[in-house]
């Protein structure tokens, strides 16, 4: 694609592969950002908006947003810190997927039992900046001399194999389910940080005239994220039990309460967290609610 065709368009960077890619495509679909991506091309124009999607490695996206001409991007919170771009980009929205922990791991059953045991030893990681900062603070706290300090070595992949292959005493790596860590005979002894996917924008806007479009996309994505976290719960209840029911279902702001034809009864409609709905339905039943119905959300504005 001729990049001249991108002039005047909002540039939106999306991870081209990896653990965030498929979720990002679902998010774009939920926000009604329609596009066709030609095979083997990493730039495409949205069909229904003045947007060009740029598919980049997630690790590069903070730099393109912070120092390049890209207006918006989706990447990991950990990637922003590792690339030292936190002063150049602003996290506009946490997206609720790609959640994992950057953890210090050592061989299970080995001599190292706690973080302090790793001080002065060899650490292998692909998060060189974050690991160095983390262990520098540990070394300083333990008052280690320059020659005693922990050594950080960079490896781009297969970090979990470093201990068994004699390259490291411990590693710093992302843990999602923990399956890979356990398969490598490792266990976590400390957590450097918790991370997830985030929507980022440049701290200093590159194209001020595109600010309304940036805000619209942010609102849409926020609605899609909220729709994934909440469900709508509707139920009927007598007025004398409504106060107790409101304590169980306070809603994001307040429940919608409507009178019913049957005297002293009301209908309630309220947003509740999806991961708590089973317990909430049980509590409502005990209070005396009837006709409890739950509906999934495709989208919302909250």
Image (tube, rainbow, N blue to C red):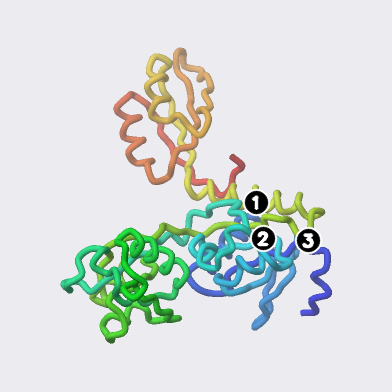
Does 55 sit left or right of 137 as displayed? Answer: right
**Mark 3 vs 1: CB contact within 8 A:** no
Tell me if I can see residue 180 in this picture.
Answer: no
**Mark 2 vs 1: CB contact within 8 A:** yes
Which residue is at the front of the view, 67 or 47? 67
Which residue is at the front of the view, 198 or 97? 198
| Residue shown at the point (27%, 69%) measured from the top left | 118
Q: Which mark is residue 203?
A: none
Kindly identify which residue carries mark 1.
218
Where's residue 16, x and y in %? 58, 74
Badge 1 crowding class, 10 Å Cα cut-off, few under 14, some 14 to 19, many 20 or more, is some
Position above or below: 173 against 77? below
Kindly identify which residue carries mark 2.
72
Kindly identify which residue carries mark 3.
50
| Element assignment for label 2 | strand
Marked residue nearer the N-terminal end (2 or 1)? 2
| Element assignment for label 1 | helix
- Disc 3 and disc 1: Cα gap in Å? 15 Å
Foreground: disc 3 or disc 2? 2
| Residue shown at the point (59%, 47%) measured from the top left | 223
Badge 2 crowding class, 10 Å Cα cut-off, few under 14, some 14 to 19, many 20 or more, is many
- Disc 2 and disc 1: Cα gap in Å? 9 Å
């Amino acid at each position: 694609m001729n990049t001249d065709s991108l002039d005047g368009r909002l540039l939106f960077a999306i991870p081209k592969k990896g653990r965030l890619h498929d979720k990002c495509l679902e998010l774009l679909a939920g926000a009604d950002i329609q596009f066709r991506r030609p095979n083997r091309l990493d730039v495409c124009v949205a069909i229904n908006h003045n947007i060009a999607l740029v598919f980049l490695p997630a690790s590069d996206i903070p730099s393109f947003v912070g120092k390049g001409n890209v207006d918006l991007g989706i990447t990991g919170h950990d990637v922003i810190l590792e690339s030292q771009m936190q002063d150049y980009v602003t996290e506009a929205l946490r997206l609720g997927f790609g959640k994992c922990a950057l953890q210090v791991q050592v061989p299970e059953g080995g001599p190292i039992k706690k973080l302090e045991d790793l001080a002065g030893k060899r650490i292998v990681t692909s998060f060189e900046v974050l690991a160095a900062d983390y262990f520098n603070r540990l070394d300083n706290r333990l008052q280690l001399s320059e020659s005693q300090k922990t050594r950080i070595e960079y490896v781009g992949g297969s970090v979990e194999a470093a201990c068994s292959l004699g390259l490291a005493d411990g590693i710093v790596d992302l843990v999602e389910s923990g399956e890979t860590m356990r398969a490598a005979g490792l266990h976590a002894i400390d957590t450097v940080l918790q991370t997830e996917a985030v929507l980022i924008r440049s701290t200093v806007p590159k194209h001020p005239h595109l600010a309304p479009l940036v805000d619209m996309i942010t609102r849409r994505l926020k609605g899609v994220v909220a729709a994934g976290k909440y469900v709508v719960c509707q139920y009927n209840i007598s007025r004398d039990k409504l106060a107790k029911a409101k304590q169980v279902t306070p809603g994001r702001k307040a429940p919608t309460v409507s009178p019913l034809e049957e005297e002293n009864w009301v209908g309630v409609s309220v947003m509740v967290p999806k991961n708590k709905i089973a317990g909430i339905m049980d509590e409502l039943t005990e209070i005396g609610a009837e006709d409890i119905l739950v509906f999934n959300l495709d989208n919302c504005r909250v």
